[in-house]
Amino acid sequence: MVMTTTTTPTHTKLRAEGFSCPSCVTKIEKQVGRLDGVEAVQVHFASSRIEVEHDAAKVSVDEIVDAVAKAGYVSKPSAF
């Protein structure tokens, strides 16, 4: 018998800086989406918000922030 555990994804919100054009959205979504454990990424250009659904056991918030940095943008966790 194989036991499967389902974990509820963690919903992380980040505030980003330096958005200058809508193509920034694609760059960030691609970079963060490559991380193992990331299930969904949505970048809100107008509000400079990034929302990520991820498995916290596989990828940390710091790793997500690092991925955003690799795309060329500064971000930090946000409560809203």
Image: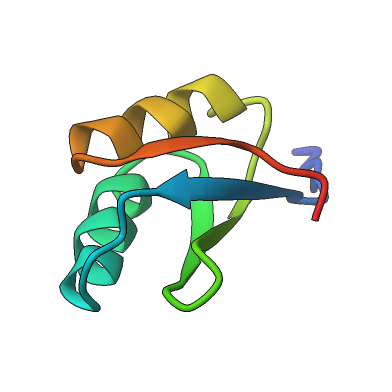
Seen in the picture, residue 37 relative to 23 is either above or below; the reply is: above
Task: From the viewer's perspective, tell me whether residue 10 is left or right of residue 71.
Answer: right
Seen in the picture, residue 72 relative to 25 is either above or below; the reply is: above
What colouring does the structure picture have?
A: rainbow
Task: From the viewer's perspective, tell me whether residue 75 is left or right of residue 27.
Answer: right
Q: Nearer the viewer, residue 71 or 38?
A: 71
Seen in the picture, residue 39 relative to 56 is either above or below; the reply is: below
Residue 29 lies, in percent from the top left, at 33, 61
**Quarter of the image where one finds residue 45:** bottom left
* Residue located at (41% from left, 47% from top): 17
* Residue located at (47% from left, 37% from top): 75
Q: Nearer the viewer, residue 53 or 57?
A: 53
Residue 24 lies, in percent from the top left, at 22, 64
Seen in the picture, residue 6 relative to 42 is either above or below; the reply is: above
Q: Nearer the viewer, residue 21 or 59?
A: 21
Camera sees residue 78: yes
* Residue located at (20% from left, 32% from top): 70
